[in-house]
Image (cartoon, grey):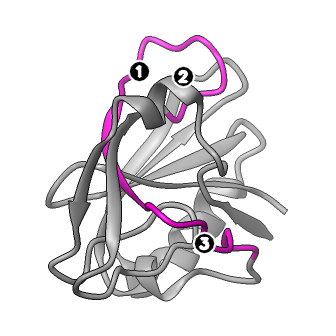
Amino acid sequence: MFTVCPLPSPMSADAEQSALSCTSLGGEPCRRCLTDAEPGERLLLLSYDPFLGDSPYRCASPVFVHAEKCKPFDGPGLPEQQRRRLLSARAYDDLHLMFDADIVAGAALPELLERFFNSAAVSYVHLHYARQGCFAARVDRA
């Protein structure tokens, strides 16, 4: 019913060039492979705007990605990274306008996504980590 889309790899040259290189303390969520970093791994902290079109909701967000190439998440289902965190889910229409939104425990995310995608008006969903507010992943209809 839905597909979780990781960040592209590589990012734009500008994004990666302005990124801050850091060493993981452990648990930082990589937005490419959608797994948490292990202590000591090299990460890039960069700014990412998840919108693929013009939107008044457009806003760059800080995200971590592994500094070394990692395999992008390719499903099926939800990554463990999202299933165990508190999330803000924001549903958008084809015009990139917010249609619906909710806060959800990751374990209940499949039911919320089903509710969102039951509306023909919903085109895609952005997930954000509710506590930090950072972009987590985009979810599309399957």
Describe residue 138's horizontal placement relative to residue 126 as left or right: right
Residue drawn at point x = 74 percent, y = 79 percent: 75
In the image, taking residue 38 as reference, residue 75 lies left or right, namely right
Compared across the picture, whether 105 is left or right of 90 comes to left
Mark on residue 97?
2
Category of crowding for the residue at label 3, using alpha-carbon neighbours closer than 10 angstroms: few (below 14), some (14–19), many (at least 20): some
Q: Answer yes or no: do the residues labelled 1 and 2 have beta carbons within 8 Å?
A: yes
Q: Is residue 44 visible?
A: yes
Can see residue 104? no
Hey, what amino acid is under mark 3?
Cys
Residue indicated by mark 3: 70
Which secondary structure class fits the magenta region best?
Answer: loop
Please identify the quarter of the rendering in which residue 131 is found.
bottom left
Tell how many labels.
3
Residue 17 on image: x %, y %:
42, 31
- Sequence-wise, the earlier of marks 3 and 1 is 1
The x, y position of residue 123, in whole percent, is: 72, 40
* Extent of the magenta region: 50-74
Q: Earlier in the sequence, mark 1 or mark 2?
A: 1
Q: Secondary structure at mark 1?
A: loop
Residue tagged 1:
57
What quarter of the picture does the C terminus occupy? bottom right
Give the distance between the C-alpha atoms of the residues marked 1 and 2, in whole angstroms.
7 Å
Front tag of 1 and 2: 1
Residue 67 position, x and y percent, is 44, 61
